[in-house]
Structure formats: C-alpha cells, structure tokens
Amino acid sequence: MFITLEGIEGAGKTTQIKEMVNLLESRGHACTVTREPGGTAIGKKIRSILLDPACDEMNPLTELLLYNADRVQHVETLIKPALNAGKTVICDRFYDATTVYQGYARGLDIGLIMTLHKLVLGGLKPDMTILFDLPAKIGLTRAWKAVRQGDRTSLETRFEEEKLEFHEQVRAGYLDLARQEPSRFRIIDAGQDQKRVKEEILKVLAI
C-alpha cells in the first residue's frame, strides 16, 4: 500500500507519522517512511536548493523541474522497490504537492504539470492520500513557532516566507483535488489538538 500525506506548512503531518507506523506495523504492515523533496541522497541535495530561503529568486519553472528531478530519483530508487517488496510506503508529500504549489499557487500550466506526472510516475498513484487541512494563517503561525523553537531548521523556510495569500491558494488547491478524487483523499481537521488528530488518523487507517 502507498499512503501519502499532504497539507500546508504547519499542518502537523510529520508529527503524526510515528503513530501511523506503530499502528500499521502492529497490524502486520512493514513500513517504509520517506518524504519529498529529499527522500534519497540525491534528493537531499535538491531539497537543500528548493527550500533554501536564499533561493528566493528561483523561477517557478526551475522549481517545478527540480521537484520532478527529485521525484524521478525517489520513485525509481526507493518507492517502487519498497512497494515491490510488499512494504507499505508512507510519503510526506508527493505529486499532489507539486500540483497545488506550482500549479494552483505559482500559476504554472496544470496541463504541463500533469504531463510531467505521467512522464515521471509511469502510472504510480497513491492508494490513499491523507490531507491535513487547516486555515493557512494557523498553519504558518505553527510553522514559524517550530522554527523559533528549533524543531524546524531555518535553512528550509523558503515557502514559509511566502505571503499568506500564497498559502491560502495552496490550501484551496488541495481541497479542490480532494473534491475531484474523494475515493483517494481522506481529509483530517488538522486544526484540532494532536490527540484528536491522532484519533482521526487511526480511524482512517483501520485497514
């Protein structure tokens, strides 16, 4: 099974992964946990460019192609081998993030983005996508708090530094994708406290 986690900055995806793995492994699912960008050694180098706040003049098309370069390496060397080995893969962000960040929010052509998805993925698609949804203002407040506390590195804040309107467009994009594919998406109210979010996730993962 292939499970992806999506949401705006500060939605709390990463916080919940350990609980998800504990539940799935207790049910006999061997898990591989990964993320985008940066799920491979090459991907980590790409991530350092994509999320560096010093790269604030990056062209949106450059950004799009770097994300896809990261994804090619990720899919071919980590995700597909793990799935072929019968493992459950949990990925913190995947191609939906590209669709909403570079498409809905950056304004790049959605048709171009979908063409790249087809080229890069070769038909690979998540079995389930859990969308951690909350208002953009709350998410950004949480994200910057985590940076100040040292829970997140200040070297990866290029997207946090975008205007609130950008993040509102990202959220709207995610909700639009969820409406288009209700059988794949599971929406979690990430504005709740961590305990209640965990409870909702465990219900979703009752597989």
Image (cartoon, rainbow, N blue to C red):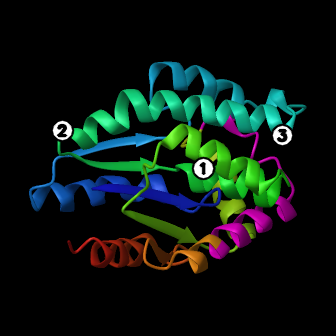
Could you say which quadrant of the image residue 32 lies in? top left
In the structure shown, which secondary structural element does the residue marked by tag 2 occupy? loop
Q: Looking at the rendering, in which quadrant would you find the C terminus?
A: bottom left
Cα–Cα span, label 1 and label 3: 26 Å
Q: Earlier in the sequence, mark 2 or mark 3?
A: 3
Residue 47, above or below 138: above
Say whether residue 100 is left or right of residue 17.
right
Cα–Cα span, label 2 and label 3: 36 Å
Q: Position of residue 99 (x, y in %)?
A: 67, 55
Q: Looking at the rendering, in which quadrant would you find the N terminus?
A: bottom left
User: How crowded is the residue under tag 2: few (<14 C-alpha within 10 Å), some, or many (20+)?
Assistant: few
Residue 102, above or below 140: above
Task: Identify the disc placed on residue 146.
Answer: 1
Residue of label 2: 85
In the structure shown, which secondary structural element does the residue marked by tag 1 occupy? helix
Depth check: give the residue in front, 191 or 40.
40
Q: Would residue 145 be seen by someone viewing this image from the given angle?
A: no
Residue of label 3: 60
Please report contact status of discs 2 and 3: CB closer than 8 Å, yes or no.
no
